[in-house]
Image: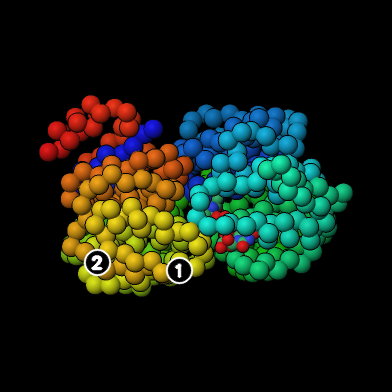
């Protein structure tokens, strides 16, 4: 197992470039199999979730070429089966996008029930409801989600909650249904817009993505396309918060500042300075940050994927902060790990009450999920002494070259094998 060893206390200073958006890329790659013609996708993040999905697409019979780690060329015309049985696919959440894509194109799909981070019950009832409304018969059997339809007929679908996954999955299927589909209470996240833009670039007819009403006029087939993925809002947000956490000065390049507004507003409120450029933001913090209240909400609200890193910052801010998680019920599991490092956080239901302490101290902690892992790395960068973050395979699912990018900003950290005690001793000697 690999782990990070981090010597905290150094301000992050310099420039970092943000990669392509994980959650957008996963939707786009699944959509890419819907045409028989070649599709070229640029600005893919080099992370394990993308590798898994591309391997799964190849295992279905598609041609998948990787001219470099940030680019894929996919030809869906050679797909031979609608059963996605690639073993690792069940580990990722976005496996379910192949269901919408295949149902739309072939009117049949069999995909593993989705995995992903253990952050709550994560039902898929809204996906199923939408597929059924379009005319599919859907069953869950032996760990697989099986959807089948003679014909998909456009219809009116009202989602009970704002779900990124259900909105994207339904767009995929409905874009090849007969007639018009209207999605109400649709999710408005940038990755929903991105998948709609990509589908439109292949010949789909989707209007209104980015608002809560999306209108889709089904078409019979798609053509090839070349597309570049938008920058990752959450990776950018993580570097913004890491810069503020370490009292640093970082220019975060290749971002869409509009997608970061909820994070920017909170950073300014707690005492950091944020300067916005056309495609970059600079975050500077010179003094101790102060308390605030955060409530996670669907976009454009404060993203649930930033909640853990933000709470980590607030654990050393002056005063008492309140963080309410409204999207996923299990998203406070990282609190016990932060407590090991000296944080004073009390969780009651979906509310975390954070009494800011003067400092965190290094400890051995465990990444329990992707964003928990990122939060613990930021905690390690702030803490006195050395922190070991175990199970960083979670972090690799969502952050490209995380340690390398942080070291480029002056962090003292290394990725080492947990068995390699010599590497641990060498690191400690080097940074002492
Ligand atoms: C996606 C992101 C994840 C992010 C989340 C919220 C991907 C691969 N993952 O996850 O990083 O944290 O959006 O921004 O893009 N819900 C239902 N029934 C459903 C679907 C969802 O009740 O059928 C509920 C969920 O339990 C949750 C809320 O809706 O409370 C939002 O979930 P959703 O937006 O679907 O999250 P994901 O698409 O799984």
Q: Work out whether 200 lies above or below 65.
A: below
* Mark 1 crowd level (few <14, some 14–19, many ≥20, 10 Å Cα): few
Outermost residue on the right side: it is 150
Inter-mark Cα distance, 2 to 1: 20 Å
The scheme the figure's colours follow is: rainbow
Of residues 51 and 66, the one nearer the viewer is: 51
Q: Work out whether 91 lies above or below 281.
A: above
Q: Which residue matches tag 1?
A: 349
The quadrant of the picture showing ligand 1 is bottom right
Q: Which residue matches tag 2?
A: 356
Q: Quadrant of residue 78?
A: top right
Disc 2 versus disc 1: nearer the observer = 1
Who's the residue at 60% across and 38% down the image? Answer: 89
Q: In the image, residue 215 lies at what x, y percent?
A: 71, 64
Q: In the image, residue 111 lies at what x, y percent?
A: 69, 42
Who's the residue at 17% across and 35% down the image? Answer: 428
Q: Work out whether 48 lies above or below 175.
A: above
Q: Quadrant of residue 287?
A: bottom left
Q: In the image, residue 242 lies at what x, y percent?
A: 29, 54
Which is more N-terminal, label 1 or label 2?
A: 1
Q: Is residue 236 left or right of residue 211?
A: left
Is disc 1 placed on a helix, strand or loop?
loop
* Mark 2 crowd level (few <14, some 14–19, many ≥20, 10 Å Cα): many
């Amino acid at each position: 197992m690999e782990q990070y060893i981090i010597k905290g206390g150094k301000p992050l200073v310099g420039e970092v470039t943000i990669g392509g958006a994980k959650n957008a890329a996963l939707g786009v790659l699944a959509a890419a199999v819907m045409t028989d013609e070649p599709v070229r996708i640029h600005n893919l993040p080099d992370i394990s979730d993308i590798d898994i999905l591309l391997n799964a697409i190849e295992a279905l019979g598609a041609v998948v070429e990787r001219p470099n780690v940030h680019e894929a060329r996919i030809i869906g015309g050679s797909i031979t089966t609608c059963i996605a049985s690639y073993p690792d696919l069940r580990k990722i959440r976005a496996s379910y996008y192949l269901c919408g894509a295949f149902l739309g194109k072939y009117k049949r799909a069999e995909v593993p029930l989705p995995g992903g981070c253990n952050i709550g019950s994560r039902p898929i009832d809204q996906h199923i409801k939408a597929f059924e409304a379009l005319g599919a018969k859907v069953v869950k059997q032996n760990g697989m989600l099986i959807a089948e339809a003679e014909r998909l007929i456009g219809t009116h679908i009202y989602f009970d909650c704002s779900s990124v996954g259900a909105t994207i999955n339904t767009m995929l299927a409905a874009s090849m249904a007969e007639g018009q589909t209207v999605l109400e209470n649709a999710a408005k996240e940038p990755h929903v817009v991105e998948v709609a833009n990509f589908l439109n670039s292949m010949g789909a007819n989707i209007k209104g993505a980015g608002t809560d009403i999306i209108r889709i006029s089904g078409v019979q087939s798609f053509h090839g396309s070349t597309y570049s993925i938008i920058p990752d809002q959450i990776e950018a947000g993580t570097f913004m918060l890491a810069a503020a956490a370490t009292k640093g000065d970082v220019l975060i390049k290749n971002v869409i500042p509009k997608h970061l507004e909820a994070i920017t507003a909170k950073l300014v409120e707690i005492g950091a300075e944020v300067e916005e450029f056309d495609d970059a933001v600079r975050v500077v913090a010179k003094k101790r940050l102060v308390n605030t209240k955060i409530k996670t909400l669907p976009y454009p609200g404060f993203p649930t994927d930033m909640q853990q890193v933000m709470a980590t910052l607030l654990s050393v801010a002056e005063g008492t902060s309140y963080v309410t998680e409204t999207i996923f019920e299990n998203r406070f599991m990282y609190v016990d790990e932060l407590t090991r490092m000296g944080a004073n956080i009390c969780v009651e239901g979906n509310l975390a009450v954070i009494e800011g302490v003067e400092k965190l101290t290094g400890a051995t902690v465990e990444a329990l999920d992707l964003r928990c892992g990122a939060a613990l790395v930021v905690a390690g960068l702030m803490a006195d002494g050395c922190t070991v973050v175990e199970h960083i395979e979670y972090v690799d699912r969502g952050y490209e070259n995380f340690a390398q990018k942080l070291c480029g900003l002056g962090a003292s950290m290394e990725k080492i094998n947990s068995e390699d005690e010599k590497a641990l001793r060498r690191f400690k000697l080097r940074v002492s």
